[in-house]
Image (cartoon, helix red, strand yellow):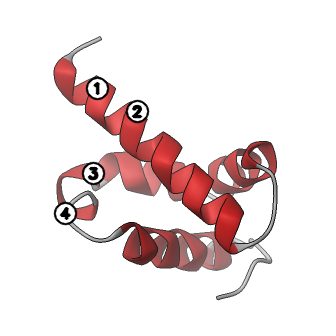
Amino acid sequence: MTSKQSHILEYLICCIGAFAERFSISNQQAYQHLKKYQALDFLKKHYDIEHTLSIDDAVDDCARICQRHGGDITL
């Protein structure tokens, strides 16, 4: 695993935890939701920009991406 891949993985884990906390769900439920509704793909694709934002902003972005793809968690 490259250094950048390791940083991306750490970032995704942090975002999953923050998403879980915000919506009062387990980390596993958050992971499944973010994966199913393409938010993890979004974070990976846009890591270079997203990781410069606050975690709260990243969670907001994830919630919006999930909503656009049929996810039922709202802000």
Residue at horizontal 33 percent and vertical 37 percent from the top:
8
Question: What residue did someone put label 4 on?
Answer: 52
Q: Earlier in the sequence, mark 2 or mark 3?
A: 2
Q: Position of residue 33 (x, y in %)?
A: 73, 55
Query: How packed is label 1: few (under 14 Cα within 10 Å), some, or many (20 or more)?
Result: few
- Which quarter of the rendering shows the C terminus? bottom right
Give how far apart the Cα atoms at labels 1 and 3 are.
10 Å
Residue farthest to the top, as pictured:
1
Disc 2 + disc 1, Cβ < 8 Å: yes
* Type of amino acid at the residue the image marks with label 3: Tyr
Q: Earlier in the sequence, mark 1 or mark 3?
A: 1
Q: Position of residue 45 (x, y in %)?
A: 32, 49
Callout 2: SS: helix
Question: What residue did someone put label 1 on?
Answer: 5
- On screen, 4 above or below 30? above
Question: What residue did someone put label 2 on?
Answer: 9
